[in-house]
Image (spheres, rainbow, N blue to C red):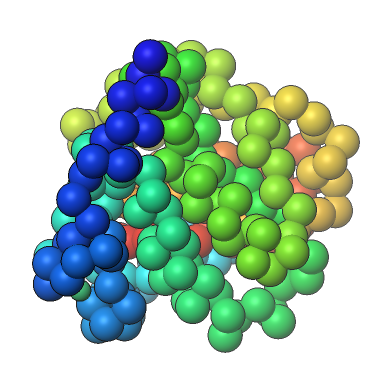
Amino acid sequence: MKKLINYILNVIFPRECLGCAKNDYLVCDECLSKIEDYNGEKVRPDIVDRVLICSSYKNSLIKKIVHFYKYKYISDLCYPLSQLMIKKYENEKDKISDPIVVSAPLSKKRFNLRCYNQAELLAKEFSSHFNYKFLPDLIIKTKHTKQQAKLNREERLLNLKESLTLSNCEICKKNNFIIIDDVYTTGATVNEIAKVLKDNGAKEIWSLVIAKD
Ligand SMILES: [Zn+2]
């Protein structure tokens, strides 16, 4: 039923660019190209070795697109958003070899509410563009956690602690990974994923996100 509602929303949602209201686009190429690169504070590597950020969450168009993507169920926005990721990564791709792509998982409860995992759709588009292996089911969320957006830094770390596991530990050994997520705030989510991967022998781990809050 939810899937049907999602489908209908995608069809009846007026195809007007979220930036300039031009018809037949969710986000037109011109508006997409005007989104400035992220030039805010650099993210200090923690467990993740490198964090690539496409844009700032202070950019009003980015904020609007991500909001519609996550909370208004317009899943087709994964196409323009993944274009930003592809563009950001293009210049860096020679610095990591054969990475495996994973995405931040959702708990079953949240997946049932939204019917899609927004990070997974982005990761799928991104990995198929570069012909990388994508393992959507590698990272498993073992408990339903509170929404990170509603918590402070300490609560976020505590909230995620030991909430993740892997469906296959062998695959980690000596492989490089890219973790795809939508918004980077404190980095608690991507670092928790990186920890599980590194505990199981992963080598270099990057994260690629749409925006930094
Ligand atoms: Zn536009």
Residue 177 showing in the rendered view: no
User: In which quadrant is the N terminus drawn?
Assistant: top left
Nearer-the-camera pick, 111 or 143: 111
Residue 177 vertical position relative to residue 113 in the rendered view, above or below: below
Where residue 137 sits, quadrant-wise, is top right
Q: Looking at the image, which residue is at 61% across and 25% down?
A: 140
Residue at (58%, 80%) from the top-left corner? 90
Give above or below for 122 relative to 96: above
93 lies left or right of 5: right
Q: Position of residue 32 (x, y in %)?
A: 30, 75
Q: Does residue 35 lie above or below 23 as drawn?
A: below
Q: Quadrant of residue 97?
A: bottom right
- Nearest the eye: 110 or 23: 23
Left or right, 143 with respect to 200, comes to: left
Q: Position of residue 205 (x, y in %)?
A: 64, 57
Position in image of residue 15 (x %, y %): 23, 56
Q: Quarter of the image holding residue 60? A: bottom left
| Residue 54 locus on image (x, y percent) | 38, 70
Q: Would you say residue 141 is visible in this rendering? A: yes
Quarter holding the C terminus? bottom left
Q: Is residue 118 above or below residue 21?
A: above
Q: In the depicted view, which residue is nearer to us: 201 or 123?
A: 123
Quadrant hosting ligand 1: bottom left
Which residue is depicted at the point 65% across and 77% down? 93
Q: Residue at x 37, y 43 (%)?
A: 75
